Amino acid sequence: MDASNRVRSRETYGQVGGAVALDLVNTVSWRLSAERCIEHFVDFDDVQRWAHQLGLVGDAQSAALGRLADEHPADAAAEVARVIALREAIYAAAYEGASTQPLVAAHAEAVASGRLDPDDHGAGWAWEFPEDLALPRRRIALAAVDLLLRDDLDRLGQCSDAECGWVFLDTSPRHNRRWCIASDCGNRNRVREHYARVRATADSPTGG
């Protein structure tokens, strides 16, 4: 993937994937277009804001991560590269049939650095990790393995737009979802297809 087009991400990240790991994959816009591809993880601030919005870190943890990134900019930049590498490993494993070994290794690293504690409601257990720069990536690793252990992976879908590349878990009643966002890629492609049909009719020998 050529992600040379790097821009500051929007304030709110899209959550159309139906799973945290898929929403992570969608932090690249126009993934399937070498010319239009946009990387939204420009720096660690983007990573921690995404993790906060997706509920992987809380308010206090997000603030602490911001301070750590300011204090250790080189480490923060290296962590962004690791998150992006993990994101691409998720995409490759889920959509390109690549090995899951990088995800298994990331999961093992996450588990090794954490501990299981009772959750806040006392109804189960949750992984707790050190509040360091790797915290978002460790929680992403757990989410990635959770995704690949689902029993409905036959419902993994990708936007039918030729350049979009956003992914999702198709939970539609008929399992016939085509678009990441029907009002965005869906409408744009329907308009394009409509005008293509109009032109084809006009250019045909029997056209009006």
Image: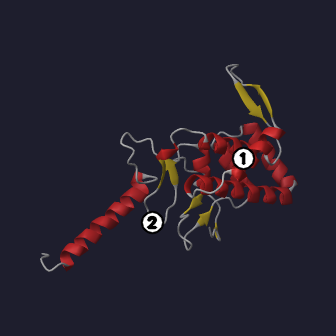
Q: Residues within 10 Å of mark 1 (few under 14, many from 20)?
A: some
**Front one among 184 and 129:** 129
Tell me the mark number nearer the camera, choosing from 1 and 2: 1
Q: Quadrant of the N terminus?
A: bottom right
Colour style of the rendered protein structure: secondary structure
Q: Residues within 10 Å of mark 2 (few under 14, many from 20)?
A: few
Residue occupying the point 78% across, 38% down: 111
Question: Cα distance, mark 1 to mark 2?
Answer: 31 Å
Outermost residue to the top: 122
Q: Residue at x 54, y 47 (%)?
A: 15
Q: Nearer the viewer, residue 206 or 121?
A: 206
Label 1, on which residue? Answer: 104
The label shown at residue 162 is 2
Horizontal and vertical percent for residue 158?
48, 55
Q: Provide the secondary structure element on which disc 2 rests.
A: loop
Which residue is rendered at x = 71% and y = 40% of the image? 57
Q: Quadrant of residue 130?
A: top right
Q: Is residue 27 visible?
A: no
Q: Earlier in the sequence, mark 1 or mark 2?
A: 1
**Residue drawn 20% across the image and 79% down it:** 203
Could you say where residue 129 lies in the image, as x and y percent from the top left? 80, 37
Direction right: furthest residue: 71
Q: Amino acid at mark 1?
A: Val
Going by the image, does 203 lie left or right of 39? left
Residue 33 at x, y = what percent? 53, 69
Residue 164, percent across and down?
49, 62
For residue 204, which numbered disc appears in the image? Answer: none
Q: Secondary structure at mark 1?
A: helix
Residue 81 makes an appearance in the image:
yes
Q: Quadrant of the image for the C terminus?
A: bottom left
Q: Look at the numbered discs 1 and 2 and tell me whether their residues touch, using CB distance below 8 Å.
A: no
Amino acid found under the numbered disc labelled 2: Ala
